[in-house]
């Protein structure tokens, strides 16, 4: 299989992850990189030895040798370059969140045509445990799904002594805060392991910014949320309950559950830790019987390499990637509705 000739725009932390995965894969030939920041270009050039180095992302997009592009820079500028890439017949893998809002995603879908386009919100569905859970739920073993739940709370640490990323909690640069930074992973994971069968209809939600005592932990003038909670009613009555917080005034608390009419699963979207999937089976005679469905170690390398290598394989195999733009649109629609509900103080319909 001929390697996919790849260009990566954005060579910071996450861009370097893509480059590490790409250079290690026989499916990918890294042709060029681009970054507006000279230090990033220098580090990436030394580490990965691309054939060409650009400052302007448009110069990379116009490179005739490149057939596929990774967009690994802040959200605010990605849709514009994705549209430019599509116009030149190039496949696109965009970092998460997929865009600033649902309208941008719809614009990308319209412009994509027959090209391959994917979003990195799929990252946590590549480990073995996620594949096993996906197949188990698809088998019907849980019956009709009633509640799909995630609660992921992280405490504030000590006051940092290094500058915080400017983009991370600023709405005009990132589209939001913890909801778009991590909530897109949570939603993609839960919707993905349930086979994208959940059809969200309405959302009731609330968001909060950082507690005053931890304001020194983030970049000055940050205005995005660090904590959100949402209840999403799906077609058929399945409820999707999600909550995530960072810089929280409490210790870690992580709960992931899938509850159906026949049984339930306890699991965890994890990174570089041992993981287990616990199955609560039921019978009329014995009630609830708890079993370990799967247990093992999950590698961060698999998690971070997944979107890049899957993108290349999808191009060559002419198949959909793990998360398509249409699926990323569902995640973004829920995200937009969460923000709207929190602002209005009422339940809102997903559009």
Image: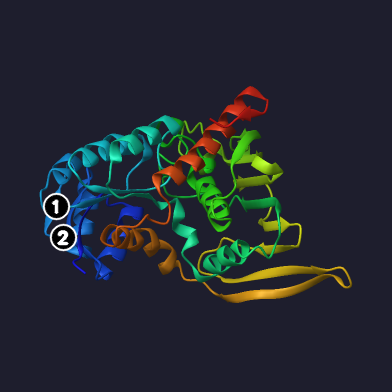
Find numbered disc 2 in the image and state the secondary structure of the residue it sits on: loop
Q: Position of residue 49 (x, y in %)?
A: 16, 63
Determine whether 5 is above or below 328 in the image.
below
Residue for point 56% across, 51% down:
191
**What scheme was used to colour the molecule?**
rainbow
Determine whether 171 is above or below 238 in the image.
above
Label 1 close to label 2 by CB (< 8 Å)? yes
Determine whether 349 is above or below 54 in the image.
above
Residue identified by numbered label 1? 53
Drawn side of residue 94 relative to residue 149, left or right? left
Query: Closest to the observer: 185 or 131?
Result: 131
Q: Going by the picture, which residue comes out furthest to the right?
A: 285
Query: Closest to the observer: 63 or 229?
Result: 63
Specify whether residue 234 is in view.
no
**Alpha-carbon neighbours of circle 1 within 10 Å: few (<14), some, or many (≥20)?**
many
Find numbered disc 1 in the image and state the secondary structure of the residue it sits on: strand
Q: Going by the picture, which residue comes out furthest to the top?
A: 344
Specify whether residue 68 is in view.
yes
Residue identified by numbered label 2? 50
Query: Closest to the observer: 251 or 76?
Result: 76
Distance CA(mark 1)–CA(mark 2): 7 Å
Q: Position of residue 3 (x, y in %)?
A: 20, 65
Residue for point 32% across, 39% down:
78
Question: Looking at the rendering, which quadrant does residue 135 occupy?
Answer: bottom right
Determine whether 196 is above or below 137 in the image.
above
Quadrant location of the N terminus? bottom left
**Alpha-carbon neighbours of circle 2 within 10 Å: few (<14), some, or many (≥20)?**
some
Q: Position of residue 79 (x, y in %)?
A: 32, 36
Disc on res. 226 = none
Q: Position of residue 169 (x, y in %)?
A: 47, 38
Residue for point 38% across, 58% down:
307
Say how many tags the image has.
2
């Amino acid at each position: 299989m001929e390697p996919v000739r790849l260009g990566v725009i954005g060579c910071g932390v996450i861009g370097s992850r893509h480059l590490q995965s790409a250079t290690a894969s026989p499916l990918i030939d890294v042709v060029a990189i681009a970054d507006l920041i000279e230090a990033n270009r220098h580090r990436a050039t030394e580490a990965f030895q691309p054939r060409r180095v650009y400052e302007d992302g448009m110069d990379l997009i116009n490179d005739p040798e490149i057939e596929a592009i990774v967009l690994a820079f802040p959200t605010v500028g990605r849709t514009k370059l994705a549209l430019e890439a599509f116009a030149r017949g190039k496949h696109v893998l965009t970092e998460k969140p997929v865009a600033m809002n649902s309208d941008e995603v719809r614009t990308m879908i319209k412009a994509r045509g027959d090209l391959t386009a994917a979003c990195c919100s799929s990252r946590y569905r590549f480990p073995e445990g996620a594949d096993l859970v996906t197949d188990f739920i698809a088998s019907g073993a849980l019956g009709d799904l009633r509640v799909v739940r995630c609660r992921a709370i992280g405490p504030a640490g000590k006051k940092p002594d290094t500058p915080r990323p400017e983009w991370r909690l600023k709405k005009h640069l990132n589209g939001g805060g913890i909801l778009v930074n991590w909530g897109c992973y949570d939603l993609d994971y839960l919707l993905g392991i349930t086979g994208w069968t959940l059809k969200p209809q309405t959302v009731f939600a609330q968001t909060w910014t950082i507690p005053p005592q931890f304001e020194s932990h983030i970049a000055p003038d940050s205005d995005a949320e660090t904590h959100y909670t949402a209840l999403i009613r799906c077609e058929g009555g399945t409820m999707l309950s999600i909550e995530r917080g960072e810089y929280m005034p409490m210790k870690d608390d992580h709960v992931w559950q899938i509850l159906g009419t026949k049984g339930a699963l306890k699991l965890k979207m994890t990174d570089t830790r041992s993981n287990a999937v616990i199955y609560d089976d039921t019978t009329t005679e014995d009630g609830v019987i708890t079993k370990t469905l799967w247990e093992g170690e999950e590698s961060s390398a698999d998690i971070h390499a997944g979107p890049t290598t899957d993108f290349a394989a999808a191009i060559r195999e002419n198949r959909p990637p793990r998360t398509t733009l249409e699926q990323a649109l569902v995640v973004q629609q829920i995200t937009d509705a969460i923000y709207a509900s929190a602002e209005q103080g009422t339940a809102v319909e997903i559009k």
